[in-house]
Structure formats: structure tokens, C-alpha cells
């Protein structure tokens, strides 16, 4: 398993699920930065002797040839990369070693960006897209967007993200006799893709929507996570005079355990693959107000885009998002109904077992093509 980040995020969590659940079938090795919390979680799952520390989101000859040597010495039979940086390393490595490579994108974020860096990334991806033995997309939207951009990934598979449904706790039903201030949750990496500043624009618009009643009606927004824009985000909270209702809460190790304490989830990301935090919130019975972007749209289309229960909004339209929030804030029965629909959707379609079986089948197909490879193969 190869990733260029091990901080909080969907890709490291996805890897952790595979390591824990398929570890009896395969000898996993992990190459990643020494970042928490997932460096420690990976080490517990595979053992320190199967861990290789690599730089965070950095590609250089020393790292590339260090990985090449590790793969050769440990007789690694499959390389499975997660995320953009790791995908570059893995698909370059496959030119040095005759080793099958599986790449999972976890969101092709450079497709929506319009700058020189993203243009270079698209060119590089076009050159490497067919070098993987299999390319996994975590949503149909993600695959369709890649194809629309003129990229032709080899061995394309759609394996939706899945979550451990058994560890979720359900949000309790509200008591109409005990009105209280509603609480909204967001998981964020404070980067351009996750669009944390869009949350503040929405809350500013929500305050304008309520006008003189804002002091009594405004909910509390707790934003969990960390990243490069967090300090500017906190500064912007103060500039907009939103400190009474918006808080940056930092990283917590098991955010899913806190989901039942909230009433709604809000996400205004510019792009997603299929976000695990959103699945965990919806699986806990929270209604989700989501930007209409790839990944989110896949969830919205499955019963949440009717006129009565439309909880999607156009990216950048803070007023529309505020109106969606206000409908749920002001209508407790609607919150309960949409929360129930969200929980049913996740429990029916996004359980962990289906995802694990599909990845396992992908590994098996690659191994069977190589008759010299034993069943309990080493995977990095």
C-alpha cells in the first residue's frame, strides 16, 4: 500500500480498512509519511518491519529508487497506490519493475482547477493513465469526469467507498418539547478542494436570511480537521463576526463517534470522490446539505433531489445553500424524514463488505494472471 499522506483523510482511512480486513489473505506492506494518526494505525495493522517512511507529497529520485529497492528486496507482488502523489510514484515504478499496479484516485481534484499546476497534472495523468494494471474509482461520477476530460484509465473499475456500519451510533430522535440550538458538523482538510471558506459565506448568508431573528435561530457549526488554510479560516471567522456560531475544532481521532451529537452535515467541497465522513454522518441518521459536485451528486441523485427533499446546492451559491439549511433548521419533521432516508441509503448501498470483496477480487485477478505468485502475496 502506497500513499503520500497519513494525516486525517478518506484515502488513509480506506487503506486502513483494507489492511484490517484483508490482512489474513495478503501480506501487506505500507509506504507512507510518518504522519499521525494513520502512521501509528498502519504500524499496528502490519507491524513496524513492514513500514517504509517516505516524504509527504514529494516525488524525487531518492524516494523512487528507495521504493524500487524495497519492492525488489521484499518480493512485493502488487503495488496499490492511493491518491495523486502516490499514483505518480507507483505508475513510474511499474516501468522499473514488472509488478502489477492498482491505483485508486480518491477524487481527481485537478480536473476542476483551472491553473498552470492543474494543467500540468492533467498532462501527466494523460501520460500515466494506462500504466496501471487496474484503476479504481470510488464513484461513477469520478470515472465519468475522468473520461469526459479525455483521460483513458486502464482497467477502470468503480468500487464505491464503504464504511463499517456496525460501529455507527444512530442519532436520537428529537424531542419537540425541548427546543435547542441545532448543531452542524463538517469534516475539512482546509485546502482549496474542501472549500472551508465557502462554509463561512454560507453562514454569512444564513445570518442575512434570518435577519433580526438570527441571534435566536443561527445553528452552531463545528469544523473538524486541520490543513494549510486553517489559520486564515479562523481569522476570517473573526472578520465576519461569526465566532459565536462557527468553530474550528481541530482533529479528533474518531469523528464518526461524534456524529450522533449533531443534527446536520454541511459540505461545500469543490470536488469529492465519495467522502467517507459524509457517508458516516448520513449512516448515523444526519441529513446532509451538499454542494452539487462529483461524489456528492451520486448521493443526491439517490432520493435527495426531489422538489420536496432537494438538499443539494450549486457550488458558490451561498444564498441557495443557506436556504437549504434554513428549511431543515425550521422543520424538525423534515429533518427526521431526510435523516431516516439518508441512513437507509447508506446502510443499503455503502457497507464496507461490498467494497472489501470487490478489492479482494481485483487482487485475485491480478495474481491469477501470474502463475508464479502464491495466494498469500505481498502487497505494498
Image: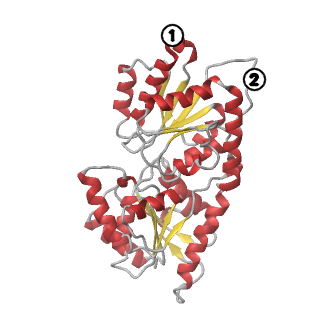
Give left or right: position of 162 versus 5: right
* Residue 212, disc: 1
- Please provide percent x and percent y for residue 355: 61, 62
The residue sitting at 64% across, 31% down in the picture is 261
Q: As drawn, which residue projects farthest toward the left?
A: 116
- Please provide percent x and percent y for residue 13: 53, 53
Q: Is residue 202 above or below residue 68?
A: above
Q: Quadrant location of residue 285?
A: top right
Looking at the picture, the colour scheme in use is secondary structure
Q: As drawn, which residue projects farthest toward the front?
A: 307
Res 334 seen here: yes
Residue situated in front as seen by the camera: 138 or 223: 138
Per the image, the residue denoted by label 2 is: 175
Q: Is residue 92 above or below residue 112?
A: below
The residue sitting at 64% across, 67% down in the picture is 357
Q: As drawn, which residue projects farthest toward the bottom?
A: 371
Mark 2 or mark 1: name the one nearer the start of the chain.
Answer: 2
Asked which secondary structure carries label 1, the reply is helix
The residue sitting at 31% across, 57% down in the picture is 58
Question: Crowdedness of circle 1 by 10 Å Cα count: few (<14), some, many (20+)?
Answer: few
Give left or right: position of 190 versus 14: left
Amino acid at each position: 500500500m502506497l500513499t503520500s499522506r497519513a494525516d486525517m483523510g478518506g484515502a488513509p482511512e480506506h487503506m486502513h480498512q483494507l489492511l484490517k480486513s484483508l490482512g489474513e489473505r495478503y501480506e501487506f506492506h505500507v509506504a507512507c509519511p510518518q504522519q499521525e494518526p494513520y502512521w501509528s494505525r498502519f504500524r499496528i495493522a502490519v507491524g513496524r518491519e513492514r513500514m517504509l517512511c517516505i516524504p509527504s507529497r514529494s516525488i524525487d529520485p531518492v524516494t523512487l529508487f528507495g521504493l524500487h529497492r524495497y519492492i525488489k528486496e521484499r518480493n512485493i507482488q502488487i503495488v496499490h497506490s492511493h491518491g495523486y502523489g502516490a499514483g505518480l510514484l507507483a505508475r513510474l515504478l511499474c516501468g522499473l519493475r514488472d509488478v502489477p499496479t492498482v491505483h485508486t484516485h480518491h477524487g481527481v481534484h485537478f480536473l476542476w482547477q483551472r491553473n498552470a499546476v492543474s494543467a500540468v497534472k492533467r498532462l501527466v495523468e494523460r501520460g500515466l493513465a494506462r500504466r496501471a494494471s487496474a484503476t479504481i474509482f470510488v464513484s461513477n461520477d469520478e470515472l465519468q469526469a475522468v473520461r469526459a476530460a479525455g483521460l483513458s484509465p486502464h482497467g477502470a473499475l468503480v468500487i464505491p467507498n464503504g464504511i463499517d456500519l456496525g460501529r455507527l451510533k444512530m442519532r436520537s430522535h428529537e424531542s419537540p418539547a425541548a427546543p435547542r440550538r441545532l448543531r452542524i458538523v463538517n469534516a475539512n482538510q482546509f485546502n482549496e478542494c474542501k472549500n472551508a471558506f465557502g462554509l463561512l459565506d454560507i453562514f454569512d448568508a444564513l445570518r442575512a436570511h434570518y435577519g433580526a431573528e438570527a441571534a435566536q435561530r443561527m445553528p452552531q457549526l463545528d469544523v473538524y480537521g486541520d490543513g494549510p488554510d486553517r489559520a486564515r479560516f479562523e481569522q476570517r471567522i473573526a472578520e465576519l463576526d461569526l465566532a459565536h456560531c462557527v468553530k474550528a475544532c481541530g482533529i479528533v481521532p474518531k469523528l464518526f463517534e461524534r456524529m450522533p451529537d449533531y443534527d446536520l452535515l454541511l459540505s461545500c467541497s469543490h470536488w469529492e470522490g465519495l467522502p467517507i465522513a459524509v457517508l458516516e454522518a448520513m449512516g448515523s441518521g444526519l441529513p446532509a446539505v451538499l454542494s452539487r459536485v462529483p461524489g456528492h451528486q451520486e448521493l443526491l441523485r439517490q432520493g435527495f433531489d426531489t422538489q420536496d427533499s432537494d438538499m443539494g446546492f450549486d457550488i458558490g451559491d451561498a444564498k441557495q445553500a443557506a436556504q437549504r439549511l434554513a428549511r431543515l433548521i425550521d422543520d424538525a419533521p423534515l429533518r427526521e424524514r431526510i435523516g431516516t432516508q439518508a441512513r437507509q441509503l447508506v446502510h443499503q448501498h455503502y457497507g464496507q463488505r461490498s467494497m472489501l470483496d470487490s478489492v479482494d477480487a481485483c487482487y485475485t485477478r491480478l495474481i491469477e494472471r501470474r502463475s508464479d505468485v502464491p495466494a498469500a502475496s505481498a502487497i505494498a
